Amino acid sequence: MEAQTRVPRIRDQKEIENIVLQMTLEEKAGMCSGQDFWHTKGVERLGIPSVMLSDGPHGIRKQETGGDHLGTGASIPAVCFPAGCLIASSFDRELAETLGETIGNECQAEKIGVVLGPSMNIKRSPLCGRNFEYYSEDPLVSSEMAAAYIKGVQSKNVGTSPKHFLANNQEHLRMTGNSIIEERTLREIYLASFEKAIKESKPWTVMASYNRVNDIFATENKEYLTGVLRKEWGFQGFTVSDWGAVNDRVEALKAGMELEMPSSGGVNDQKIIDAVKNGELEENILNQACTRILANIYKYWDNKDENAVFDREEDHRIAQRVAEESMILLKNNGMLPLSPNKKIAFIGCYASNPRYQGGGSSHINSSKVTSALQAGMGNSNISYAQGFTDGDEKVDISKWEEALETAQKAEAAVIFAGLPERFESEGYDRLHMKLPKCQNDLIEAICAVQKNVAVVLHNGSPVEMPWINSVSAVLESYLGGQAVGEAQYKILFGMINPSGKLAETFPIRLEDNPTWPYYGKDGNMTLYREGILTGYRYYDAKNIEVLFPFGHGLSYTEFAYSNLKLSSDKLKDTDCLQVSVDVKNIGKRLGKEVVQIYVSAMEPDIIRPVKELRAFEKITLNPGEKKTVRIVLNKRAFAYWNTEIHAWYVPEGKYRIFIGKSSRDIVLWSDIIVESTTECPQVFTRNSTLGEILKSSSGKKAIEEELQNLEKLFASEESSDADDKNVILSMPLRSLISYI
Ligand code: BGC
């Protein structure tokens, strides 16, 4: 794509405020809701344009007439890129940015001012019907990939709308559910997923979700919409409600929720007008909302690119590249890559008719779709049998027999399995984590007649793999977008070396997941009982065996890691730590590796995950080539959210820096001591224990005299037993009085 170097025109604040000053109360109230399903309201007499917002996120779902948020109505033919689950697996920020640029350009060509995405809720449970749209179980991956996508789209002077803010992690009762989450979990996992993307990439809008967060609707939640988003993170855009998410229009406006979508047919505009008139709502709040909306609408309007062209063929190639760089080789005992000279059986309906996108508002009317069978059309060594029908649970005997015979006659079989679309979609959750029974049975049956079996998966979220030990290879293609078949074919036959890594853990069985058995079973309440232990943070803490760990993904080449260096072995939490490590391609083909850096607090006296991903970098290496990867870690890499000081806090002590090929495959590590520069203010009562007081220097000072007596006691013969000392340390002040 041609590089564009237009300097965007940005109107200054005064100019926008002047326009708002000229608007009537009615026009201002109107500005705060949609004209119809997809457009903001224009005001002709003041030259205020009406701008289109459109889904998103992995392609454009532009509805020229009418509108729906379920993805059922007609939309223009567009390019369906891989879904978020696959894009995240690339761990490639540049790729996500390229995707953003491509979609931004499509928006320019189609006169869309804001694309509704990226979708960046955390994957709490594999059952969430909308996981396919989301990036990861890990907030760093989610936020970094989203940041790159936003940067790409907005470089084309088109806005984005990171969604769904906040704690919208299930589809079950999504419009009324109440996510009950404690402060630390919100900060470390659910807010963190948005934080970096918002601070670094400055989205023009943020979409407030349907659900409630700790009893208050996300659209009315001032603490997060204004306190965190604007005041702490410096968000400058406007917030928009998810479609139909507004509960109380006036309360929402007061909380910082500016644009209601879609149109309320004037009903809510009137409520705003009445509230201003009767003094319930300060007009100033309304003025501010209009200023924020207009400032961002004009950013698009003043920088429209009349020459932009939506080249569907060209963008199909980009969809293919994204898929190629993201698919994950989960298992390979040497069967892959396939040789074009061998007889290969392609089995399964998804080989000819792939499942490549999810249901709901992100559903694209694809301009074309390529299957693996089409991609391999020139290869006369490929035979095909359908094996099963999409959506069927039961075996179809004639298809089954044909599949077995085809597999048996070939030298290897590739089974294209996956979840039918009705199994996972926006609007409802999955009931289980299994593939349809007929598919599982067919895989086992084929393994009995053919020793070389690879499975290619099409799914938006993890599935159980009861046949994993019987097959030779597994390629996870998630929901690969409309060029899925070309990418699968090139990876299977080795034209592309796979380099995707899992951005989520695949548990062996659903029951192992941290949200089991309460996910979706708490009525209207959604209790985040697992707290900060989401995904690998939980599996590691409980040392649970997993099917495939977070960060896992194989290559056709091999990488050797060496020479891990830290810039220091002791630092203050305000300093930065430079980490460097050498990675060498010791195989025979060009490959890409994702270097993963995890940090672990070694002596925590509060709950901390065993390790947390704190940085990653994707690199390309030729055979024999070695590169040094350098990464800087700052305070956040060591910190947790301290609820006493309501801030990030690094407890003094030893930390371990891990270099991993996945969260479970650690290749190098090194330790560092971090000194804390923040002392948590502490309040002592007669029920504080001596141990707690001695930990703080101010506490220590306050009881110096008594301390000296105690020190003598600890030093004396009678009390040399460590148990005695611990008993005393755990005594509250009230009981010490009788002791000393
Ligand atoms: C979805 C949003 C989407 C909107 C408009 C809602 O139902 O949750 O993600 O952008 O509809 O289609």
Image (cartoon, rainbow, N blue to C red):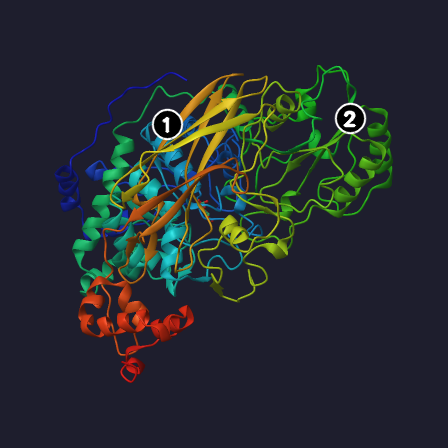
Q: Residue at x 55, y 61 (%)?
A: 520
Displayed quadrant of residue 254: bottom left
- What x and y, as percent, mark residue 491? 62, 24
> What amino acid is labelled 1 in the image?
Gln
Quadrant of the snapshot with the C terminus:
bottom left
For disc 2, the marked residue is: 412
Q: Quadrant of residue 418?
A: top right
Given contact means CB atoms under 8 Å apart, are the residues at marks 2 and 1 in contact? no
Q: Give the residue pinned by disc 1.
A: 108
Q: Residues within 10 Å of mark 2 (few under 14, many from 20)?
A: many
Answer with left or right where residue 417 lies relative to residue 123. Answer: right
Q: Position of residue 208 (x, y in %)?
A: 37, 51
Front-most of residues 187 and 105:
187
Of labels 2 and 1, earlier in sequence is 1
Task: Specify few, some or many for label 1: CA neighbours under 10 Å numbering under 14, 14-19, or 20 or more.
Answer: many
233 w.r.t. 336: above or below: below
Judging depth in this view, the residue of 658 and 654 nearest the camera is 654
Q: Would residue 256 be seen by someone viewing this image from the given angle?
A: no
| Viewer-nearest residue: 276 or 184 | 184
Residue 521, position as x, y percentages in the image:
56, 64
Q: How many discs appear?
A: 2
Horizontal and vertical percent position of residue 152:
37, 29
As displayed, is residue 512 above or below residue 119? below
In this rendering, is residue 10 above or below 645?
A: above
